[in-house]
Amino acid sequence: VGEVLASHRAYYQLRVCQEAVWEAYRIFLDRIPGTTEYQRWVHACQRESLCIADIARNFSDSEEHLDLIRRVKTTDGDCACAAQRARKAHSRARASLKSLQSEKKSFLNWTHQRASAG
């Protein structure tokens, strides 16, 4: 039973890290990551126990993200458009976080039920 639980926890952590990193690229950098950079971030998330706030901070403080903001802020109209995109991105991030939290709760309940039954 212990091996199964450990396997499920590892798989869950992998999936949460994959989703968090993918969303960070979409929201902060507005692009799809390359395979190597994506795998590097997922690995860091898994091995270094990065939390969602750490990932967000790293991506939002990146030079690529700051350059993207600077490019968008060239005129007042662009600023309004950028603010609107940021609000939409924030809303998507909040929805993704709620979904991940719900999945985590379901997984923990399932794991607890399995442990109690075994």
Image (cartoon, rainbow, N blue to C red):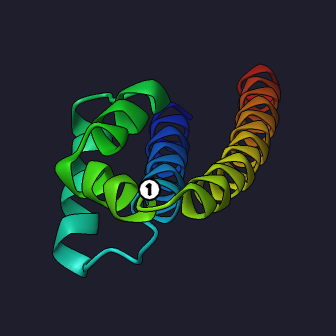
Residue 59 higher or lower than 118, as above or below = below
Q: Which amino acid is tagged 1?
A: Lys
Residue 13: x percent and y percent? 47, 43
**Secondary structure found at label 1:** loop
Q: Which residue is mark 1?
A: 73
Residue 117: x percent and y percent? 82, 27
Residue 25: x percent and y percent? 42, 61
Question: What is the crowding at mark 1: few (fewer than 14 residues within 10 Å), some, or many (at least 20)?
Answer: some
State left or right for residue 66 relative to residue 96: left
Residue located 78% across and 29% down the image: 105
Q: Quadrant of residue 118?
A: top right
Q: Nearer the viewer, residue 39 or 116?
A: 39
Q: Nearer the viewer, residue 48 or 27?
A: 27
Q: Quadrant of residue 100?
A: top right
Residue 97: x percent and y percent? 69, 39
Q: Nearer the viewer, residue 48 or 90?
A: 90
Residue located 22% across and 30% down the image: 48
Count of numbered tags: 1
